[in-house]
Structure formats: C-alpha cells, structure tokens
Amino acid sequence: QVQLVESGGGLVQAGGSLRLSCAASGRTFSTRGMGWFRQAPGKEREVVGVMQWSRGITYYADSVKGRFTISGDNANLTVYLQMNSLKPEDTAVYYCAATRSVVATTKVPFYDYWGQGTQVTVSS
C-alpha cells in the first residue's frame, strides 16, 4: 500500500497563489507517476496536472495551463502544485494521486492511491 499526505490548502482571494504538497510513503517502488485532481461540489473529479516519472511526461488541464505548475521529486516521491492567478472556479477539494501505470494517464480509474484531499477556496 501507498499512503499519500497532502498539505497546503486554504482560503485565498482571486488572483492569489497557493502551493500544495504531497508526500508518498509505504510500498512506493511500484509508483510510476503522481498528480493532482480536484472535485468541486456537484461535479466529477477531474485532472489538474500529472507527472509520469518513467517517461518524463507532464500534463495539464487546459483550464490551468499557464497558471499552475506541477513539480516533483522522483527519489522522494513528493509532488507539488504551485497555483498562481487563482480564480473562484478553482475552488474544489484537491487530491493527490499515484499510479502504477507505465503509460502516462490522466484518467481517474487508473490512479491506484489517493490522498485524503485538501480544500482550496478562492474568494471573488
């Protein structure tokens, strides 16, 4: 099993910034990628940004390109999400996730491990 622990959520005004962190522990040897997803009330969970360690691939949702940056440390299995120019529509619970898939993927079902989620609220 892999445990993921997120931190860094909170309340921020529109235009502000937040940085989320996620650390993986446990049986991490099979982890091939990590990323961030979010879920707003009444909506499905959606991808924000993911990193595939083995192929050096990084993907961002169109809605966050140019504003959010995902980075990580493969050796320590830590991933970060720097969120700038935040908008009220970015308000959601943000989840860290890890996948054993060797193919880069943004699909929720292909992520095997999930953190508990951290609330991000952007006020207008």
Image (cartoon, grey):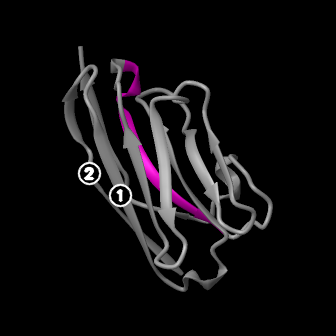
Q: Is mark 2 on a helix, strand or loop?
A: loop
Residue occupying image coordinates x 35% and y 20% = 87
Residue occupying image coordinates x 78% and y 67% = 102
Q: In the rendering, which numbered label is found on residue 21? A: 1
Magenta residues, as a range?
A: 89-99
Question: Which quadrant does the N terminus fall into?
Answer: bottom right
Q: Do the residues labelled 1 and 2 touch (CB within 8 Å)?
A: yes
Q: In the rendering, which numbered label is found on residue 8? A: 2
Q: Quadrant of residue 6?
A: bottom left
Left or right: residue 55 compared with residue 31: right
Give amino acid for label 2.
Answer: Gly
Left or right: residue 104 compared with residue 7: right
Residue 68 image offset from top left, x and y in percent = 46, 36
Question: Which quadrant does the C terminus fall into?
Answer: top left
Q: Is mark 1 on a helix, strand or loop?
A: strand
Residue 3 image offset from top left, x and y in percent = 44, 74
